[in-house]
Amino acid sequence: MKKLTKVLVLIVLALGIGFGANAQGQKIGYVDSQVIIDMMPESAKIQQDLQTYYSELQAELQAMATEYQTKMRDYEANSATMSNILRQSKEKEIVDLQGRIQEFQANAENDLAAKQEELSKPMLDKIKAAIDDVVKSKGLAYVFEKTVILSIGDSAIDITSDVKAKLGL
């Protein structure tokens, strides 16, 4: 539902801006930034670094899962002979470990997203600067991302190749 609302807002904005821009004779462009990102030399390094970071997080999670399995096997094998206080202590350990695993998983997702943003920011800034340069040189009033436009009119200008050239791709 949230996604649909965002799309509708984008459509309304695009239509409103489009009508206003056409009424004033302003030029509108669009760019397929994913094509540019895929061609950037930094993109492969970013993906490799993210994969390495993801593998480190997975290894840590696997170690926690192994610890959990070991504690569970030990508990199941010995719970019948444990005193109440020891059994409660082991149960609390297991529950606490489950909580730590769940917290780690949630934090790992956030950390991975933050790492991706951190690694991608310099490349995205470079792309944004190239887009800004092309916008100025072509005298465009607005530039939209191609993947979020529902319809592209004949008068819209595709600046993807100009941005690639600006970046030396």
Image: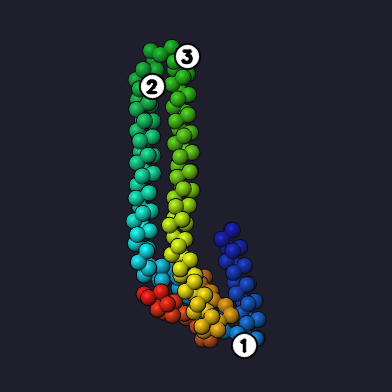
Which circle's residue, 2 or 1, is located before the other in the chain?
1
Decide which of 14, 37 is in the foreground and name it: 37
Position of residue 73 measured from the top left corner of the image (x, y, whole percent): 35, 25
Q: Quickly name the residue at label 1.
A: 25
Determine the residue positioned at 48% across, 33% down: 99
| Residue 153 appearing in the image | no
Quarter of the image with the N terminus in it: bottom right
Decide which of 77, 114 is in the foreground and name it: 114
Structural distance between the alpha carbons of marks 1 and 3: 80 Å
Structural distance between the alpha carbons of marks 3 and 2: 13 Å
Position of residue 52 measured from the top left corner of the image (x, y, whole percent): 34, 50
| Residue 27 appearing in the image | yes
Determine the residue positioned at 45% across, 68% down: 126
Give the amino acid at mark 2. Answer: Tyr
Q: Quickly name the residue at label 3.
A: 85
Q: Quickly name the residue at label 2.
A: 75
Q: Residues within 10 Å of mark 1 (few under 14, many from 20)?
A: few
Q: Quadrant of residue 162?
A: bottom left
Give the amino acid at mark 3. Answer: Ile
Give the amino acid at mark 1. Answer: Gly
